[in-house]
Amino acid sequence: MNRKLSREKAMELLFGMTLSKDTMEDAVEAFVENYEGDIKEIDLTYVKQVLIGVNNNKEAIDKVIQENLHNWKIERISKVNLSILRIATYELLYDKEVPRGVAINEALEITRRYSDEKSVSFINGVLDKIKQD
């Protein structure tokens, strides 16, 4: 199983859930049914853990993100970037199995694939501040 790919799929699902208001169960079920790659490459346990963790701690995660924004409101962040920030912040605060540097680096790699270079710098700055807290 590929943790990097699993993290990316968790972000895609979280983003999709933000737009569709699907439950985690419905989103994961639809993902499994429609995934065109080898589903064995995805660590579904990890994906669910991240989605549940973000959902259960969303208020605290968003508060930490907001506290570490400079001249920004969380509402202004694109849904993709917010999904990336939420997962990375969840990993930094709650998932002690993921090294802090890995959480940030993986978030930046996902940002490069799904957003632009300005977003990479923005997310790096926010996560670096969160890491220092």
Image (cartoon, rainbow, N blue to C red):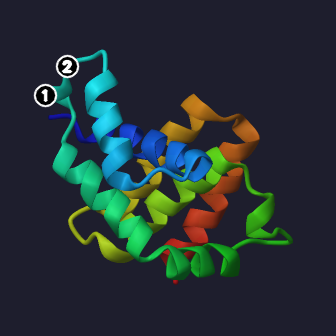
Give amino acid for label 1: Lys
**How far is the residue under mark 2 from the one under mark 1?**
5 Å
| Residue under pointer 1 | 40
In the image, farthest residue toward the right = 71
Q: Quadrant of residue 74?
A: bottom right
In the image, farthest residue toward the top = 36
Please give left or right for residue 93 compared with residue 117 in the image. left
Q: Residues within 10 Å of mark 2 (few under 14, many from 20)?
A: few
Q: Quadrant of residue 113?
A: top right
Give amino acid for label 2: Asp
Residue under the image location 45 percent in, 59 percent down:
88
Q: Could you say which is closer to the camera, residue 124 or residue 91?
A: 91
Residue 10: horizontal and vertical position, in percent?
38, 45
Please give left or right for residue 65 compared with residue 40 in the image. right
**Position of 123 relative to 113 (above/below):** below
Contact between labelled residues 1 and 2, with CB atoms less than 8 Å apart: yes
How many numbered tags mark residues here? Answer: 2
| Residue under pointer 2 | 38
SS at circle 1: helix
Residue under the image location 42 percent in, 66 percent down:
54
SS at circle 2: loop
Please give left or right for residue 85 compared with residue 89 in the image. right
Residue under the image location 57 percent in, 46 percent down:
20
Quadrant the N terminus occupies: top left
Residue 47: horizontal and vertical position, in percent?
28, 49
Q: Residues within 10 Å of mark 1 (few under 14, many from 20)?
A: few
Residue 81: horizontal and vertical position, in percent?
63, 49
Residue under the image location 43 percent in, 77 percent down:
57
